[in-house]
Amino acid sequence: MRFLYKRPKPEDVSDEINTLMEVMVSKTLIYVDLFLYSFIFTVLLSPALHSVMFSVLFFFACYVFFSCLYFFVFNRLWKKLDISRK
């Protein structure tokens, strides 16, 4: 059965992996993930939160905190690593 399946060229596989990596580290996808993680975090902590208004404020605070953490720490760290590699 193996002789029926032709393996792709390494260059093609490398191109597909590079395309996938570009999509996975795009800023839009990262911010959408942060939004979903903040929402999940808020929903899981909803029994401890006192009201709906406090839950909404907690959600926005989490999203802003995680976004700032990404922007000021990880994003700048990756930029420094990219500059040092060049």
Image: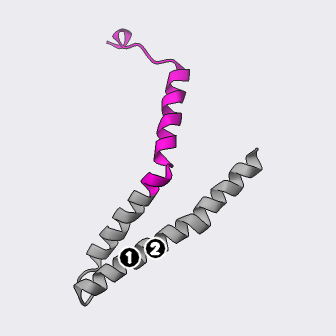
Q: Residue at x 48, y 75 (%)?
A: 65
Circle 2 sits on which residue?
A: 64
What span is colored magenta in the figure?
1-30
Q: CA distance from mark 1 to mark 2?
A: 6 Å
Q: Foreground residue, 24 or 10?
A: 24
Q: Foreground residue, 16 or 68?
A: 68
The picture places residue 75, in percent across and down from the top left corner, at 59, 60
Callout 1–callout 2 Cβ contact below 8 Å: yes
Residue type at the position of mark 1: Phe
Q: Foreground residue, 8 or 28?
A: 28
Secondary structure state at the residue bearing disc 1? helix
Instruction: Work out which quarter of the rendered image holds the C terminus and state it.
Output: top right
Residue at the top extreme of this rendering: 3
Q: Is residue 43 visible?
A: yes
Tell me if 35 is positioned left or right of 50 in this view.
right
The picture places residue 10, in percent across and down from the top left corner, at 54, 22
Q: Quadrant of residue 58?
A: bottom left
Q: Is residue 9 magenta?
A: yes
Secondary structure state at the residue bearing disc 2? helix
Picture layout, residue 51 above or below residue 37: below
